[in-house]
Image: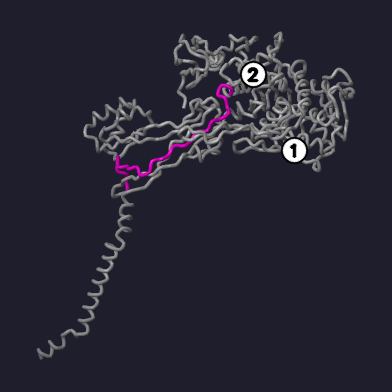
Amino acid sequence: MTGHSLQGDRVPTWRRRAVLTLWLTAIGVICVRAAQIQVVQSSVWQGLAEAQHQTDVEVPATRGSILDRDGTPLAVSRERIRVNVAPRELTDVEAARALLRESLGLSRSAVTRLTSTDRVWAVAPDLYAPVVRDALRGARGVHLETVLQRYHPHGDLARGVLGGVRENKGAGGVEIVFEALLGGVPGREVIARDNVGREIPGERVMMTPPRAGGEVVLTLDMDMQEIAQQALEEAIEETSATGGDVVITDPMTGEILALVSIRGGRTTALSAINTPYEPGSTIKPFTVAGLLQHGLASLDDTVDVGDGRWEIDGRTITETHLETSRISVADALRESSNIGIAKAAQAFTPGLQFETLRDFGFGGLTGIELPGETAGTLRRPERWTAMSDESLAIGYELSATPLQMAMAYGALANGGLLMQPRLIRETRSATGQVLERYERQLVRRVLAPHVAAQVAQALVDVVEDGTGTSARMASFQVAGKTGTARLDSGHGYERGAYYASFAGFFPAEDPQLVVFVGLENPQGASYYGGAVAAPVTRATMEAALAARATPLDRSALIRSARRAPVTLPVRSTQSFAASEVAAPTSLSPQVRDRSAGVTLPDVSGLPTRVAVRRLHALGLRVVPAGTGSIRAMRPPAGTRVQPGDTINLRLSIGEGE
């Protein structure tokens, strides 16, 4: 019985062999897989393990600078220090707190929070100047991180043109157009992390250093830009306009010396290139120029304006300021007669009138090196209405940007050449090597020189004895034209809303500057271009004369000055700060001598705009920091300085960027 039981409990041989085979197979698979992982795939798994404890990150390059035509920085990258604290690494907490208070200027409570051992990692609440690096270097538990920050030494000056930087990438303006050059080449560094993925303080290894970006040199002149911006800001304030534009160019080269747009109180707008408007009477010189160029009329030809009322194709054009029923084409331009110019324009064929306006650049892009430019509107003749030829002659049924107007007036100033606007002078590498120098670009000849000279003289008469007398200067003749056009909201004209403008050049005999000024929807009884825009032009030109560190050729100015300066009448118009500094009535060699030093006056307590004007009058550059009245300046008052030197103003509230 017992023997039978033992024999029945015995495991069959085949089953034992099967189990043994299974175990041997499993062990073999494990050994093979272990060999595969440890030998064949060792580098792969090692990389994955290291990736869990190391992170390869991009190191941004130092962004290149944007400079004005004289090399004055307008946008630069500055180094700032972020201070991180690992409280549990501190060996002497009280000493560390004292060091942080002294170095960072933090309050006692802020330092206590920063060094609390309840936290593994804490970040100081601000970015600091590089000087803190020397004070905190080597302090145990304190970890410093370099941060590159975009800095604008002159605040919002030309910010619309410059653009901005977001997440180390250009955003608008020159920053985005030249991103490839300015951005440089990022580097790479490895950051060590602990077992839960947190960065280990101080464990950073640079693998590939970044390469700094290059530089972009603009045609803008910092002083001219500041003069234009302040004049426009004051004009908007005094007229309660909703916005405005100022464009200043060199008519001989097409270089843009100042480009200012303000909308909604913001100077970052670029409406001068992307917001077209109906130009109104400022288009009339081009109508007259086309008639002269094609031999369809002369300035002495007369036009019958009747009793100031003209009915044509169901529309009535009226005028009330003319004292005679027949005027010359020159007088029609001088007095801005809608009837006179519109009747003279009947000599055009639709195709020729269209080509004349198109040749001056209307309806097409100017090619400025900025994003977002619009071409305005100039419909082809086949889409005209019965009244289009009369409307176009006096500045309606088309739209143009302030930049287009400035470039077109440049063609009247320089003898008939339409230039491409030029904002960039040159680009440079990070080492200062010139990569590309931008030369002036001629678009086309639009007028014969003698025709341009005739139109220019007619525009002198506009300023001397016509609708633009508020732009008249004592020492120089100015050529220009006023314009007042109704604002089109896109759904029709706004009731009582106008765009008042003035475009002109000076000196008329040998033009160096073209100035366009436009004010959107100025309030009050005097909303006409001659009343609100022309004075801004005059103030801008006078300030340019007073500020000797501008790109004006003063030797040429002496040759162009009036032989006998005229006395300007007293006007009941706005008084802009730019005109608080009188332009010199005589440009003698002594006035032009920049080698003679000047004594820095005391401007403490003065409003910023007044102080800046006084310093500009001495030929000095000004860098304000903050807002409010002047609290201090460097160098101090009484210091002997040279024209062209930079004066730093510290204002009473806050600090600049």
The amino acid beneath tag 1 is Leu
User: In terms of image quadrants, where is residue 443?
Assistant: top right
- Residue 230, image x and y in percent? 58, 21
Residue at image mark 2: 541
Q: Return the residue at label 1.
A: 378
Secondary structure beneath dot 2 equals: helix
Q: Is residue 513 above or below residue 273?
A: above
Asked if residue 208 lies left or right of residue 35, the reply is right
Q: Residue at x 51, y 31 (%)?
A: 66
365 or 159, which is in the foreground? Answer: 365
Residue segment shown in magenta: 197-224
Q: What residue type is labelled 2?
A: Met
Is residue 83 placed above or below 530 in the rendered structure? below
Q: Is residue 220 magenta?
A: yes
Q: Position of residue 645 (x, y in %)?
A: 49, 17
Q: Say whether residue 350 is magenta.
A: no
